Image (cartoon, rainbow, N blue to C red):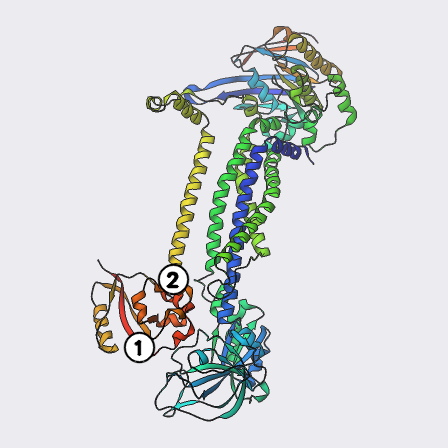
Amino acid sequence: MNVLSQLTLRNLRLNRRRTIVTIIGIILAGAMICGVATLVASFQDVMIRTTAKTDGSHHATFEQVRYENSKYITEHANTETSMLTRDVGFARLEGLSNPDKPYLVISAYDGPAFSHLPVNLISGRYPSEADEIILAEDVNLNGGLDIAIDDTLTLDVGQRMDDGVLLSEEPLSETEALTSELTRTYTVTGFFERPWYMSYSVPGYMAITYLDKSELAPDTFVDVSITAKKPRHIYDTGRELVATSQAASISYNSDLLRWMGITNNRELGDIFETIGLIVIILVVIGSVSVIYNAFAISVSERKKQFGMLSSVGATGRQIRLMVFFEALVLGLIGIPVGILSGIGGIWVTIEVINKLMPGSFMRSGTELQLVVLPSSIIVSIVFIALTIFLSAFIPARRAARISPIDAIRLTTDIQFKGRQLRTSRLTRRLFGIEGELALKNLKRQRKRYRATVFSLFISIVLYVSFSSFMTYGFSSSDLYYTERGYDISVRKYDDSTHEEKLNLYTKVAEMDAVEQYAIVRYQDLITSEIDESMFSSYVREQFIESHNEELRSLYMRYDEKAFTHSCKYSWCRSAAMRLPRTLMSCSSMSQTIWMRIIRAAS
Amino acid sequence: MTILRIENLCKVYGKGESQVTALDNVSFSVNKGEFVAIVGASGSGKSTLLHMMGGVDRPTSGKVFIDDTDIYALSEAQLAIFRRRQIGLIYQFYNLIPILNVEENITLPLLLDNRKVETSRLKSIIETLGLEGRTRHLPNELSGGQQQRVSIGRALINGPAIVLADEPTGNLDSKNSREILDLLKYSNRHYNQTLIMITHDPGIALQADRVITLEDGRVIKDEVIRR
């Protein structure tokens, strides 16, 4: 090892306290950067797993493809797994108690489809023969039947026709009838959770049978879902395959793809990565200010040494390298420790989160897991190395510029002019001679004084910006996920029809003062004869205690959209998620409609 | 043979009213193997002159040639390399690196050059300096006289073109002063080492071959004492 490196190591050892402080600074920076990267990766992972569970793990679905054309999709180079599904039709099921839902809505899935599409089995097993079937559990809960596994159902399957019009998911019409396509006896092999995407207005309960490819005619229409080998290219592959397979349409599992960081909407980007990057940059700025100071002080304390080295002929480059070598040594110790402690910290955080929210993240039954990606570690190393380099750069240049003459002239006293040290008489009066001495001391060491003020300043700025970033970040995501604020709610309380109500709202909307408005459509489910014991303890504590009267004649109110997006309002979310399923056996349904003026001119 | 040539050297500190002329058109030359003493009152510009000759500070105008090299025409990095190979500097306050031991301090110019240390030369220098058994000591474990010997060793290790000494005995008692001066004279005789020394002690100055007297930044006397 060369003499200057040895010198550096000895300096580090002699100034043990500063060395440790600098290493701690690097460890903190590393821990924060690596922590942010790991947290982002872990959240991304849990979001992907959650979305795969609720929306399926497929990437795209080609709808209404002729079976003979499906090979173009299943055999495409970018197709990893393909799954076939088909809408079989409707079958009347005797004994259903809900007059609005007399049917089973039957689809057929092949093996891969069961494992990739969001069918959450509650009991039993998936069908593996064309005469096996699984049923949505609400056929018993809402439909009032008592079907069990291994029961057999003989069904006449057909399509809903109403006056020559084919119906699919429309509410029940009084004049409709079922065509007859086939009659089959199915064995029930299991029950699955009522899928969230199934609209409540569909006049039936979902049932899925096994799709036997040998029964498919070449011109039968099927839906083909795929996972891609290269998900990044799914949008290109999709476009290409729609054309070659003559699919009627394509739908992407865009929520899943978005969490995977794949989007065809450039503006959206990946929100997590952006937030992560902003936080990392804030951390880098903060760490640079701390680590920079450590190097600056280290260099200024060794000014004489650098000057002496220069006088015996050390070049600027050699001295610069000396400072960078110091940075390298500190980095080699600090970076691995920092990264490990960052990962450890996030591991603890995740454990705590999972303890606080046992068994579920976002109510999906998936748990947050620590995900350490090589890329997070690489990103951390790059950013900390950059931080250290930036911190050492200016001090290194300053050290290289120290001329021998500076060292020769540099005595232990700091040189100054009397004028610089002048303090006002007020200082002495206010703080006494001690205060005056302190101020003179600060003025004497302007550089260090400035460095201190700068660090303080940066820390405060970082603290404020970080906390407001978090606050605004959370409130804006609240805005996104929950109800938006509004100024005035307008509601017509009478027996008028929807049209009449809408007319009023339209008139209000035309008023000058209204800048932005929304029409809200609410679906009321009204049910009776519910007693408290039917609710989970959570609902009893949180809800019934405080809304006792409302619950006597219980009505639950759901936003129409909330049904399809698993309830946007925490009010009904907590209730709906934990209410027993009997609540769905509502005795009547009605719709109300009102408007909200989100922003009105004052 | 001329080893050092100074031409119309000027150095001005500060600007405007507070301007101070430290060196005013100084010219002289020194032959190889000469032992020159530069004397003058405090503030006469002798330290400034030494720094100019040592290539550690830049003149306002004028030139310094060492071994026919115009040292201020060199780049900063070239000058640093020139300094470590051709100039030995000895300061009043030794300027040793406190955390390097005696041997490392002496060989520092070689180590900076990534050159191998010639053991026999190092050994002979350490013997001449009387530092046997002290090579592993740190500077602060040595007396002032011993520290100055280390800095002499550092100045001589490369066999430089000139050795510049700035009041090398200024911080020492008379016994140590005599020994240091004897060492410098020995190197001058023994290695034919060119030696330029600043002093304000007339007794020391008289031991040199030649005495240059400075006053207000000008050479007012340049006399050869012995040949």
Residue under pointer 1? A590
In the rendered image, the vertical position of residue A594 relative to residue A274, given as above or below: below
Q: Residues within 10 Å of mark 1 (few under 14, many from 20)?
A: few
Residue A544 on image: x %, y %: 35, 65
**Disc 1 secondary structure class:** strand
Q: The numbered mark 1 sits on a residue in which chain?
A: A
- Mark 1 / mark 2, whichever is N-terminal: 2
Residue B65 on image: x %, y %: 62, 23
Q: Which of marks 1 and 2 is in front?
A: 2
Q: The numbered mark 2 sits on a residue in which chain?
A: A
Q: In this view, does A440 lie to the left or right of A299?
A: left
The answer to which quarter of the image holds residue A159 is bottom left
Residue B18 on image: x %, y %: 43, 19
Q: Is residue A266 left or right of residue A405?
A: left
The quarter of the image holding the C terminus of chain B is: top right
> Which residue is more in the foreground, A397 or A282?
A282
Q: How crowded is mark 2: few (under 14 residues within 10 Å), some or many (20 or more)?
A: few
The quarter of the image holding the N terminus of chain B is: top right
In the rendered image, the vertical position of residue A80 relative to residue A218, given as above or below: above
C-alpha span from label 1 to label 2: 28 Å
In the rendered image, the vertical position of residue B170 relative to residue A376, given as above or below: above
Say whether residue A491 is visible: yes
**Disc 2 secondary structure class:** helix
Amino acid beneath label 1: Ser
In the picture as drawn, the residue positioned furthest to the right comes out as: B120
In the picture as drawn, the residue positioned furthest to the top comes out as: B203
> Which residue is more in the foreground, A595 or A375?
A595
Point 56% across, 15% down: residue: B46
Rendered image: mark on residue A136 = none
Residue under pointer 2? A541
Amino acid beneath label 2: Glu
